[in-house]
Amino acid sequence: MTNISKKKSHEAVDLFNGGVNCAQAVLLAYHKECGISKDIALNIAAPFLGGVARQREVCGAVVGMSMAIGLIHGSSKDNSEPDVIKLTKDLCAKFKERHGSVVCRDVLVGRAAMNNKEQASKEVNKEYYASKPCARCVEDAAEFIEEHFTL
């Protein structure tokens, strides 16, 4: 294993700000360490924007982080490697501690506004995301991977 030459969390934020979705940004920042091409990373993570196809379920940054963990540290055995499961749970707990949840709608609008139809129906564009913590979620998810791996 080698050390990371550029801070992946900054790269992930740059990718997100450049137009890729949150899951793509995290996974794409680690595509080399995951052993996949940029195109494969983009394609695999494409449907996970906005909490899985904009359904506001699990945060895409968390999904991208989990995919990267699996690709970097996973097992090809039929049963999941216990270390991968534990690490994923630990990093999800850390994300939840920092952002209050791993669920996109909770992170975006807060628990009190979770069912606010007006908020959920707002147009999703750069201005919308500029007022949301998405870039910070991407940065944190990528940083949590950095903290646990010497790549």
Image (tube, helix red, strand yellow):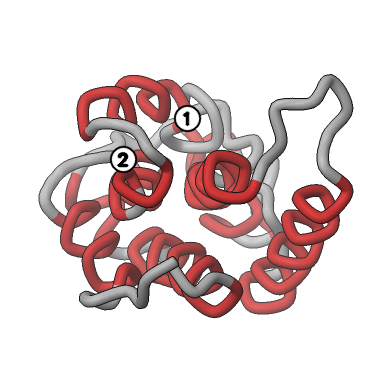
Q: Residue at x 36, y 77 (%)?
A: 3
- Work out whether residue 72 or residue 43 is closer to the camera in this orientation and state it: 72
Classify the position of the N terminus by image quarter.
bottom left
Q: Residue at x 22, y 40 (%)?
A: 20
Query: In the structure shown, which secondary structural element does the residue marked by tag 1 occupy?
Result: helix
Classify residue 92 by image quadrant.
Answer: bottom right
- Amino acid type for the residue under numbered disc 2: Asn
Residue 68 screen position, x and y as percent: 51, 46
Kindly check if marks 2 and 1 are in contact, taking CB atoms under 8 A apart as contact: yes
The mark nearer the N terminus, 2 or 1, is 2
**Which residue in the structure is indicated by mark 2?**
21
Residue 31 screen position, x and y as percent: 32, 44
Q: What is the residue that sits farthest to the left in this orientation?
A: 18
Classify residue 99 by image quadrant.
Answer: bottom right
Residue 126 screen position, x and y as percent: 18, 48
Inter-mark Cα distance, 2 to 1? 8 Å
- Amino acid type for the residue under numbered disc 1: Phe
Residue 105: in sight, yes or no? no
Q: Residue at x 83, y 34 (%)?
A: 80
- Work out whether residue 132 or residue 122 is closer to the camera in this orientation and state it: 132
Residue 107 shown left or right of residue 88 in the figure:
left
